[in-house]
Image: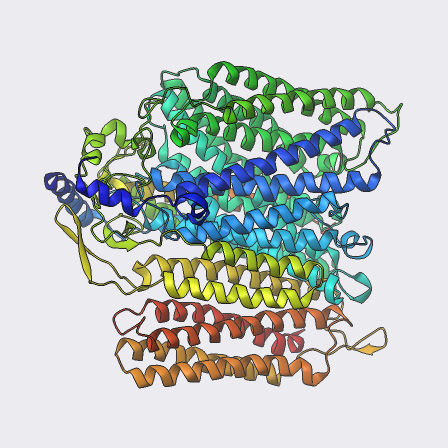
Amino acid sequence: MSERVNRQAVPLHEHERLRPMRMRLWWIAISPTVWAIHFLASYITAAIWCEKMMAGNLRPLQFSVAIYTAIALPAIGWVGWASYRNFRRGDPPVPYDFDDPTDRTHFLGFTAFLLSVLSVVATLFTALVFVLIGSCD
Amino acid sequence: MNDPRAKRLLKAWETPKGWRYWSAVNNSEVGLWYTLTAFAFFLFGGVLALIMRVQLALPDNHWLTPDQYNQIFTMHGSVMMFLFAVPILEAISIMLLPEMLGSRDLPFPRLSAYGYWCFLIGGVFVCASLFFGVGPRGGWFMYPPMTTEYQEGIGPDIWLLGLSFIEIASIAAAVELIVGVLKCRPPGMRLNLIPLYAWYILVVAVMILFAFPPLIAGDLLMELERAMDWPFFDVERGGDPMLWQHLFWIFGHPEVYIVFLPSIALVAMIIPTFARTPMAGYGWIVLAAVGTGFLSFGLWVHHMFTTGLPGISIGIFSAASQAVAIPTGVQIFCFIATLLVGRVQRKVCLKFVLAGLATFIIGGLTGVMVAIAPFDYQAHDTYFIVGHLHYVLIGGTIFPIVAGFYYYYPFVTGKRLSERLGNIAFWLMLIGFNVAFFPMHLAGLTGMPRRVHTFPGGMGFELPNLISSIGAFGLGAGFVVLLWDVFRPKGNHPYVPRNVWNAGTLEWSGQVPDHPWGIRSIPIIETRYPLWEQENLMAEIDAGQFYLADAEEGRRETLVTSAVDAELIQCLRVPGPSFLPFWAAVFTGGVFIFSTYHWWMLAGCCSVLSFATIVTWMWTGTAEIPEKETKPVGLGQSLPLYVSGPAAVGWWAMFITMLGDMTAFISLVFGYFFYWTVHEDFPPAHWNGEPVVGAGSLWPLVSVGLGAVAWFAVVMARRWNHNDFILGFYASSSLAVAAALASGVALVWGPYSNGMDPTVHVYSSTTGVLVLWSFVHLILGATMLLYCMARRLFGKMDAEHDADIVNVTLAWHFLLLTVAITGSVLALFPWVA
Ligand SMILES: [Cu+2]
């Protein structure tokens, strides 16, 4: 019984040394949270602009959403890139689907990477609306 | 069973007998009651649906009056959503999750029991209103001003108070399930090894935590309008019914995923078993669950496309509605891939899974159609939507749950459901469902509106409606067959073999018939499908070779592990049977039910009794100082019996509860700013000739200052308690109590001294609701401190065993935030605006 515990402990130790950063559960939530903030900021800005300014001119609104996007995309990109590097450590094959107990950083890195890709797509979707729709009505 | 250790363990986990059976709090009993009750409500909602289909079978039918019909369709929607869809998934999770995680019980068994009794009492109360002809009539979304100005009677109050009560029970279950997944896993079960079911439930429970509070906030606003005439939704006094729609759908869209994801979680357990292979793309499915959870909060406005919002807002939400199709698609591809690589066994259970997926895909496609705003303008409020949402909900939720019934029936009873009857039920349901709901799309496209009690002949509605009604009875017949199979006596049927489906996950390790101990000994987990991949696991579990194989002190115990790596932290003693949760629920129910009828005296008595019961429950059942610091739990390990701070389950529960509480508060603040955006000048100086006043600037800021003093005193009280500086602890706690009360008084004094009348204009009433919210929270904060002082006085808390004050300090961080936001918004925003 105790042998089993040890078997598990040794490779884990090796792996810990390879980690560039401490991977925690909340790591996977960062990219979608950035999407959510970008989404809310865009929505609120648009709602206030359309209610309060009443103007046909949407340039300032589009400009602010462009700024939000210029902040959000690199942030998500950075998380995605860091996660990808974390995940590629030790070169696991893609598509990655193992359940090695020592593998949880790979797993968290991989999932965070996928979520970053999804968040980039969703953020671009939001931003595109402001490119395509030119009026409040 | 000759092992004396096993005998002691069994004794500790014994289910109470006779009438005391109802004092049980163990997850297997509570989960079972919960499931059966939710299923009973489902049948009730189903009967209501059939009554509606009878009414709509023929044109110009006057079998039901419009009023009866309105009550019935409102109840059908409300029952299915609030009394079936959400509760059954919590019920199933309470029953299954601990077994999947090899845990003895969830961390707060009495909280589960309390949630169950609240659910039962509230549900019966809401349903019963129909039999007295006073049921709510406003649709399951209760849009004002219809429900605030144009409907007499107490129907809306029953809906608001009865369902708020149940929503609180749902949040309690969410807290339980989050802490269960994160902290009560078996050692070694790292995040990348937990059963997919647990991932989904984690996501869903977090969603409940952020989705239900906005609705509770909305309920509070509407009830204040109905009971006290505070004009939140009254346009004539500056209110706006759109705020309700926002709050309702911020809840309402995630709700769709809250009921959908746990059903998919069942699918994710069933498919690998019948495909005889591990699920393909574990990480991808986690991506899908987490991604859907997030994106589903960005969809709420797609229920409001026709309310005249700016085109650009509609565009944003339309885009997000398309984006959510990506993760949903990913998980369905993973399921299909697993079925393709595996050697599939054709069982009824799997047929329901496949039917569910196919139906859901159809409903998803019509969903993408209505997510495109121009199409939605056409289809809005027609039967097309009714068809769409039933494809989504029956395909996405009900078929998988029926599959779950077939799959987990042997787990619960040790017997199995009949494949032959199952096939009959399957074909009846599948054909009946499509015959019932497909024609609704056509009726809708022809122009038939929703929520009408009858329709005229000669407009092309007759045929689709008649077909729908026939189909509905086919679907109903399928459920009757299922019901018969589930409840017919099976005394002479043989028990199934152990692990009857040859599944790979831990919940199937139990013996048949099973013992109430959850699991004989808590194993070390190294794989995702331990029963397939870890040799001899069952034999070693049975032999008690792992953790907690004994209950030397006769106490119920389970293991607490760390959130990511599942390393051992604590041996947690969980409370046993008790009637306290039952009485607490009865009294809390009394508060809500008597308030509906405005019987304030009785409601007041009940709130005192419920407070007393809950304090007794906390006092006797939580943060107990153990007789020794550590105990051996097996395999040469010794673990502490008492833990405080972020490692403890109580700390997590407090943190999670306060997150939900904050979400409700932020929703109220959102309301304040919402009114600012819709008004030219907010706050207005006069309205209808009367002056509009708020809280002023001085007193709210004084309140923030006093709140900060109280918070600081709380932090010092925790530190001095830890340093065993007893006098400092009491002095600092007393100061905190005094400052908290003073802060509350200052907050109320502002509007009071200004002569604010909350009924004049919505500015005054939003000010009023923020003041009320913070005031109640300050009183609560003071009460918690008095509780800690009493604990210390009676030796139930000391320098080492300080969980009470640590958790109260955590709550106070949130309280300070609440008071600071309230005070500064009230004091400063009128200047900015
Ligand atoms: Cu929706």
Task: Kindly identify the residue that appears in the image at 76 percent across and 77 percent down.
Answer: B692
Q: Position of residue B462 (x, y in %)?
A: 82, 22
What's the image's color scheme? rainbow
- In depth, the one of B221 and B66 nearer the eye is B66
Locate residue B398: give its quadrant.
top right
Quadrant location of ligand 1?
A: top right
**Residue B784 horizontal side relative to residue B231, left or right:** left
The relative height of residue B331 versus residue B253 in the rendered view (above or below) is above
- In depth, the one of B831 and B760 nearer the eye is B760
**Residue B758 horizontal side relative to residue A3, left or right:** right
- In depth, the one of B381 and B169 nearer the eye is B169
Locate residue B824: give its quadrant.
bottom right
Task: Kindly identify the residue that appears in the image at 69 percent across and 60 percent down.
Answer: B223
Q: Position of residue B457 (x, y in %)?
A: 88, 25
Task: Kindly identify the residue that appears in the image at 36 percent across and 22 percent down.
Answer: B495
Q: How many numbered dots are placed on residues in this image?
A: 0
- In depth, the one of A17 and B116 nearer the eye is B116
Outermost front residue: B18
The reply to whether residue A30 is in sight is no
**Residue B528 horizontal side relative to residue B828, left or right:** left
Q: Quadrant of the C terminus of chain B?
A: bottom right
Q: Position of residue B294 (x, y in %)?
A: 50, 46
Task: Kindly identify the residue that appears in the image at 72 percent across and 43 percent down.
Answer: B130
